[in-house]
Amino acid sequence: MSVFLGTHQNRIDAKGRVSIPAGFRTVLRAKAVEGEALMILRPSHTLPCIEAWPSAAFSALAQPLDRLDMFSDEHDDLAAALYADAYPLDSDKEGRIILPDFLREHAGITDQVAFMGLGRIFQIWEPKAADQRRAEARQRSRRVTLPGNRDNAPGGAA
């Protein structure tokens, strides 16, 4: 399975480096594209965390921009939101990265981080905020029914 799973906490070392969890490194390597950064980091639009996108997934995220008029306000706004704060990053040979200061500030990260797997991407959080986010997501997810999945919903629909 080539998705990001679980939540893993790591400490930022004295040089400002943090190790990407081994399972996440395996997924990143499997999704790596020759000649491109291992991942793209960006601040979340809606949450106080950092999103980490494999380069190919980030490219797919940006593809709908091509359908907008390149000179429109909509294109400019979406392009700025996606690209202006995006930061391509490779890890060192030990799998460590240095989080840019502006991203650390966005997420309120100081000396520890929580890596939270979300399937095709992962997020990097301040650990207590990650705990709170997971608790809120579990609570709200109880009310979610997946589209087209009515027959598989609890209680079933006939």
Image: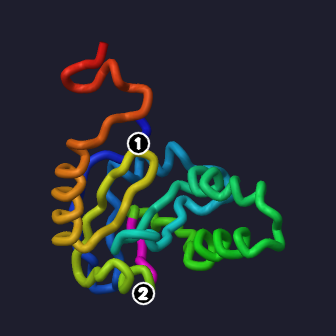
Residue type pointed to by label 1: Val
Picture coordinates of residue 96, whole percent (x, y): 39, 68
What residue do we see at 17% from left, 51% from top? 139
- Residue 131 position in % (x across, y down): 17, 63
Residue 23 horizontal/vertical position (percent): 33, 48
Disc number placed over residue 3 in the picture, else none: 1
- In the picture, which quadrant includes the N terminus? top left
Q: Check disc 2 and report the residue beneath it.
A: 101
The range drawn in magenta is 96-101
Report the number of discs: 2
Residue 89 disc label = none
- Magenta span includes 112: no
Residue type at mark 2: give it: Asp
Q: Is residue 141 left or right of residue 70?
A: left
Residues at marks 2 and 1 touching, judged by CB atoms closer than 8 Å: no
Crowd rating for badge 2 (residues with CA inside 10 Å; few <14, some 14–19, many 20+): few
Residue that appears at 38% across and 26% down = 149
Q: In the image as oriented, which residue stretches furthest toward the front?
A: 158
Left or right: residue 152 compared with residue 132: right
**Percent x, y of residue 18:** 32, 72
Judge left or right: residue 98 versus residue 133. right
User: What's the CA distance linking mark 2 and mark 1?
Assistant: 27 Å
Residue at image location 23% in from the left, 51% down from the top:
140
Q: Residue furthest top?
A: 158
Q: Nearer the viewer, residue 47 or 101?
A: 47
Q: Residue 129 appears in which quarter of the rendering?
A: bottom left
Element class at badge 2: helix
Mark positioned earlier in the residue sequence (2 or 1): 1
- Where disc 1 sits, the SS reads loop
Taking the image as shown, residue 146 lies to the left or right of residue 32, namely left
Front residue (pair 52, 31)? 52
